[in-house]
Amino acid sequence: MKLIIKGRRPLSGRVRVHGSKNAVLPIIAASLLVDGETVITQVPHLEDVHTAVEVMASLGVDARLRGSTLTLRPEGLSSFEAPYDYVRRMRASFLVTGPLLARLGRARISLPGGCAIGSRPIDLHLKGLEALGARIRVGHGYIEASAAERLTGSRVYLDYPSVGATEHLMMASCLAEGTTVIENAAEEPEIVDLANYLNAAGASIYGAGTKVIRIEGVRALKGVRHQVIPDRIEAGTYMVAAAITGGYVEIEGVVPDHLTAVSAKLREMGVDVVEDENSILVNASRRRLKAVNIKTMPYPGFPTDMQAPFMALLAVAEGTGVVTETVFENRLIHVVEMVRMGADIQVDGRVATVQGRRSLYGAPVTATDLRGGAALVLAGLGAVGVTEVSGVEHIDRGYDSLDANLRRLGASVRRVRPRETADGRLAAGTTGGLAGGRH
């Protein structure tokens, strides 16, 4: 599929944010720890979520997604191995290792490998599991973990505040014997949401959202109903969409405190950002925006997932902005495609210098990763002419109905088949009409 975007249309109206992709995936994995039924609400329809559901089913879990509600019953849990195909498609599948180890005493998982935005080493995960008493063997493309009896609480220091490692060790420790302390833990809101789910199920987790998390092991967890927090990255993307089009948009169903760094940078650029209890109003209709410098950092710093979208905004701002990526070493790969649209960006290692231009210009571009793909859509919204974004499958991994929501705000965005031309006609040899939305 492609997205065909006609730019320079100010967005206006209201848009409601879906549940958080980065929160729901570890909660799905954590449901393996629970005796009884887990019901998760506000679940986004994303490719990664569907993959997670398939992983659960492959392990013997009764997993059913109806609308935005996911029901998980692990009574039939029988397999300790996550199939290679799922782990290859989605790295978060690796998070079932700890829960399987805690419940079955054994787990066998394909090595997740790297991804387009850079390597994501799992050594912190494995060292942490070993500290809890797991025996780890790595070879022939697989990780095999085993524990003779219950895992044992321990003190674990993370060399880097990894979100995935923090979540993984929190889950594995819930059913361990004794107390586990995770030091230099990640502080992201998604970690707090996972802890809230586990605590509602009967876990004893203290300090989630701080640098030190303490988990008192319990014998069992019970089924629970849990609503996933709003997706702060989706919300931030709509905020930038409003800014790059000179629009006036209210983003509803958000937690403004989760977006403090994003809101601060937009205000610094000259955007009016007004926060209410559960919404954020973005007004960029008054003036051309000013360039700022951005440095990605672990939460509560500026999120790495918003770096690419902000670079699209800096490309049309007044002045020069410097973007420093500290989290992933290859997360500037979208720059090449933005340059095709007329952006003036120079890259030196993990630093990009962006000289703002009055306009970008529509061009055929290709998304190579999730957030880079979203950034190309944003660039197309602010560009003169027509932009064709290929590689939409990357965008669909993290955004539920992005094109439909943008259309409701007044954008000209169409989803078309690969061989359909920008003017809506079909190339020779192609049959059929316009492809509809994803859902």
Image (cartoon, rainbow, N blue to C red):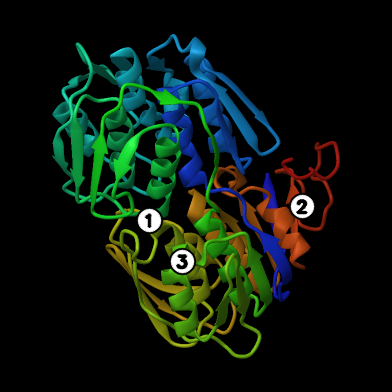
Relative height, residue 70 to residue 416 (above, below) = above
Secondary structure under the numbered disc 3 in the rendered image? helix
Mark closer to the chain start, 3 or 2: 3
In this picture, residue 130 sits left or right of residue 65: left
Q: Comparing marks 1 and 3, which lies closer to the viewer?
A: 3
Residue at 51% in and 20% down: 36
Residue at 60% in and 45% down: 396
Q: Position of residue 415 (x, y in %)?
A: 73, 50
Q: Position of residue 145 (x, y in %)?
A: 24, 18
Please, what is the three-letter code of the amino acid marked with disc 3?
A: Asp
Secondary structure under the numbered disc 1 in the rendered image? loop
* Residue holding disc 1: 331
Q: Which mark is residue 257?
A: 3
Nearer the observer, 273 or 320 = 273
Please, what is the three-letter code of the amino acid marked with disc 2?
A: Thr
In this picture, residue 21 sits left or right of residue 168: right
The C terminus lies in which quarter of the figure? top right
Residue at 44% in and 77% down: 264
* Residue holding disc 2: 421
Residue 324 seen from this side: yes
Q: Comparing marks 3 and 2, which lies closer to the viewer?
A: 3
